[in-house]
Image (cartoon, rainbow, N blue to C red):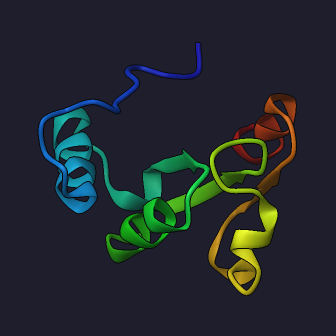
Amino acid sequence: KYFDKIYGKEPSKAKVEKFKKILADHEVTADETIQITDTVGDMKDAGKLAINSIIVTYGYQDREFFNGYEDSVLGFADNPGQILNYVN
């Protein structure tokens, strides 16, 4: 219902290249795309292509890692249900 495909373990280690592949595979632009992530690195790499991010605070890095980046993301989700606040 919400996702066409979930990417994660593709061969390329460069996240920017993975993001480019996703955009090309689905023939969408960065402004039509939202990344859901739990790491600052993923957020920064998505930002290089102007892809917006929703940060989940219950994953690999907690909210403290994102201090100072509040204006760089769509928002924070403290549980899976809160993600829907940003995609509906």
- Quarter holding residue 9: top left
Q: Nearer the viewer, residue 55 or 31?
A: 55
Q: Is 72 positioned to the left or the right of 75 in the image?
A: left
Coordinates of residue 77 in the picture (x, y in percent)? 81, 47
Which residue is outermost to the bottom?
A: 68
Q: Residue furthest left?
A: 11
On-image quarter of the N terminus: top right
Tell me the residue at 22%/48% (across/down): 18
Closest to the observer, 76 or 11? 11
Q: Residue at x 37, y 59 (%)?
A: 30
Say above or below: 51 vs 3: below
Q: Position of residue 79 (x, y in %)?
A: 85, 36
Quarter-of-image position of residue 76: bottom right
User: Measuring 56% from the left and 58% from the top, which residue is drawn there?
Assistant: 39
Q: Is residue 8 above or below residue 1?
A: below
Using the rendered view, name the quadrant where residue 15 is placed.
bottom left
User: In which quadrant will I find the C terminus?
Assistant: top right
Residue 61, given in percent of the width and then of the height, sits at 66, 56
Picture residue at 45% right of the left edge, 73% below the top: 44
Q: Is residue 43 left or right of residue 17?
A: right
Q: Position of residue 40 (x, y in %)?
A: 55, 67
**Of all residues shown, which one is farthest toward the top?**
1
Q: Is residue 62 left or right of residue 14?
A: right
